[in-house]
Image (spheres, helix red, strand yellow):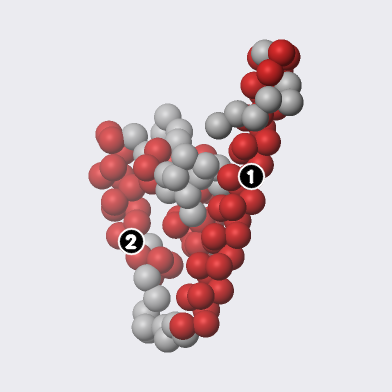
Amino acid sequence: RTPAHDACWTVKPNLDLMDFLMQEAPQLLGLSDVRGHTPFAYARRDHWAVWMGFLTQRRHLIIPSKPRRVSASSICTTVTTSAAANAAMSARAAQLSAAAASRANPQLTGVATR
C-alpha cells in the first residue's frame, strides 16, 4: 500500500494528507496495491461524496491543463518495466508460497508444487 491508500482507508477522510500527496506525488492516485486496488477503492461508500467534492476542487492536480505528447518508446518502456516488475513479484510470491508450504508440511520439502 501507498500513503494514498492509507489516506483513503480511514474512519474519517484524511483530506489534509491526500491534499499533500496530490501536490507532491499525484501519481500515487493511480498506483495499485498487491490486491490490484487503487487508493479510492478503499474509500468508504458513505465518504464518496466528500471525496468527489475534494477531487473536483483539485482536478487541476490530476488532469494536466495541456495535452502531453506521449512517445511510443515511453509507452514501451513503461510496459516493459511493469512486466519485469510483475514477473519479479510473481517469482517472489512463488518462493514465499513454497516456503510457507514447507513450514506447514516439512515432509513436502524438496517436492515440486504447483
For image coordinates 31% across by 38% down, the residue present is 47
Residue 64's place in the image compared with 66, above or below, is above
Give the position of the N terminus as an image quadrant. top right
Density class for disc 2 (Cα within 10 Å; few <14, some 14-19, many ≥20) is: few
User: Could you say which disc has been placed on residue 91 in the image?
Assistant: 1
Circle 1 residues within 10 Å: few <14, some 14–19, many ≥20: few
- Residue 87 relative to residue 67: left or right: right
Asked if the residue at tag 1 contacts the one at tag 2, i.e. Cβ–Cβ closer than 8 Å, the answer is: no
User: Is residue 68 something one can see in this rendering?
Assistant: yes
As drawn, 72 above or below 22: below
Q: Nearer the viewer, residue 68 or 111?
A: 111
Q: Which image quadrant: the C terminus?
A: top right
Helix, strand or loop under label 1: helix
Q: Nearer the viewer, mark 2 or mark 1?
A: 1
In the rendered image, residue 46, in percent from the top left (x then y), is placed at 27, 34
Q: 48 or 15: which is nearer to us?
A: 48
Three-letter residue code for mark 2:
Gln
Give the residue pinned by disc 2. Answer: 57
Q: At x 37% / y 42%, what residue is drawn?
A: 41
Q: Secondary structure at mark 2?
A: helix
Can you tell which quarter of the image residue 84 is in?
Answer: bottom right
Q: Earlier in the sequence, mark 2 or mark 1?
A: 2
Tell which of 102 and 38 is nearer to you.
Answer: 102
Residue 28 spot, x, y in % from top left = 51, 56
Residue 102 spot, x, y in % from top left? 70, 20
